[in-house]
């Protein structure tokens, strides 16, 4: 298998938060901050989730669709307050509560890409998330 060394830029909808860069952690699963994560351990805790047992701390999470309700906002804020947080959330689609939660927590968020973002980014790739411009750049 050949690996491309070209930089790839994906455009989504601008979101809250500051520009960050880091390692991607990717799954095509949906995402609930409240029910998929163990805040104390800093890991994905729902056994059925493809990232179960993996640490989300300091990663740029690339996932499918946000799910969940109002508990998401306080959970994201609590993650930031505790220091056990991802650097950013990259989603195919974020519901309004996830967007509000990310803004409340000052957590970078981009969604609504013109491709399935979980198909084009791989775990372990270095990415730059720039919410202001709505771009996710994969280092070449």
Image (cartoon, grey):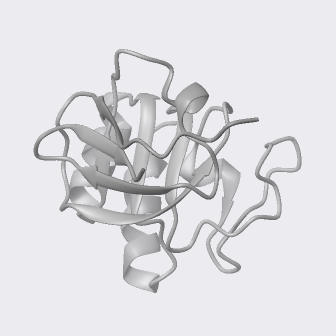
- Return the residue nearer the eye: 123 or 1: 1
Residue 44 lies in quadrant: bottom right
Q: Residue at x 68, y 70 (%)?
A: 55
Question: In this rendering, is residue 8 above or below 93?
Answer: below
Asked if residue 7 lies left or right of residue 100, the reply is right
Q: Residue furthest left?
A: 132
Residue 109, percent across and down? 31, 46
Q: Position of residue 89 (x, y in %)?
A: 42, 49
Q: Compared to 102, does 113 lie above or below?
A: above
In screen coordinates, is 119 left or right of 95?
right
Tally of numbered tags: 0
Q: Tell me if I can see residue 67 in this picture.
A: no
Horizontally, residue 103 falls left or right of residue 112, namely: left
* Residue nearest the viewer, comparing 9 with 71: 9
Q: Is residue 55 visible?
A: yes
Image quarter of residue 12: top left
Which corner quadrant holds the N terminus?
Answer: top right
Residue displayed at 42% across by 61% down: 76
Looking at the image, residue 108 lies above or below residue 32:
below
Residue with the most extreme top position? 114
Which residue is depicted at the point 47% across and 65% down?
86
* 6 and 26: which is toward the camera: 6
Q: Residue at x 60, y 26 (%)?
A: 119
Residue 102 point in image, percent of width and height? 30, 52
Instruction: Indicate the position of residue 61 as horizontal and vertical percent values.
Output: 52, 52
């Amino acid at each position: 298998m050949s690996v491309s060394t070209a930089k790839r830029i994906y455009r989504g909808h601008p979101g809250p938060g500051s520009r960050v860069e880091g390692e991607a952690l990717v799954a095509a699963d949906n995402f609930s901050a409240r029910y998929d994560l163990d805040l104390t351990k800093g890991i994905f805790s729902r056994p059925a989730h493809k990232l179960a047992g993996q640490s989300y701390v300091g990663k740029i999470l690339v996932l499918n669709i946000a799910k969940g309700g109002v508990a998401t906002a306080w959970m994201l804020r609590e993650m930031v307050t505790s220091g056990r947080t991802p650097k950013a959330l990259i989603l195919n689609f974020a519901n309004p509560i996830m967007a509000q939660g990310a803004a409340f927590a000052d957590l970078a968020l981009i969604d609504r890409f013109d491709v399935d973002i979980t198909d084009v980014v791989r775990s372990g790739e270095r990415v730059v998330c720039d919410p202001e411009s709505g771009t996710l750049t994969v280092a070449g």
